[in-house]
Image: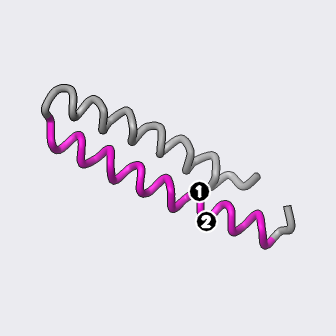
């Protein structure tokens, strides 16, 4: 498994937490940051998956 997949998964989780906290406290900026972190994490997961496929894992 590529390290980008691990980083991506961590960012997705971090983004979900930020988004939930932002919603709970009414902080639109924090909620938006959470959504951005989730999107960035998904991209990392995709890149890591592609690297795994290219390596034949």
Label 2, residues with CA under 10 Å away: few <14, some 14-19, many ≥20: some
Q: Quarter of the image containing the C terminus? A: bottom right
- Asked which quadrant contains residue 47, the reply is bottom right
**Residue located beneath label 1 in the image:** 45
How far across and how far down the image is residue 45, in percent?
59, 56
How far across and how far down the image is residue 32, in percent?
24, 48
Name the secondary structure under disc 1. helix
Dominant secondary-structure state across the stretch colored magenta = helix
Magenta highlight range? 27-54
Label 1, residues with CA under 10 Å away: few <14, some 14-19, many ≥20: many
How far across and how far down the image is residue 56, in percent?
86, 67
Name the outermost residue toward the right.
56
> Taking 3 as reference, is 20 left or right?
left
Spatial distance from mark 2 to mark 1, Cα to Cα?
A: 6 Å
Q: Vertically, is 27 above or below 34? A: above
How far across and how far down the image is residue 23, in percent?
21, 33
> Taking 29 as reference, is 2 left or right?
right
Say if the magenta span includes residue 5: no
């Amino acid at each position: 498994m590529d390290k980008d997949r691990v980083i991506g998964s961590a960012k997705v989780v971090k983004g979900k937490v930020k988004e939930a906290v932002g919603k709970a406290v009414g902080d639109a900026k924090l909620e938006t940051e959470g959504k951005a972190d989730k999107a960035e994490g998904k991209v990392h997961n995709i890149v890591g998956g592609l690297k795994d496929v290219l390596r034949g894992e």
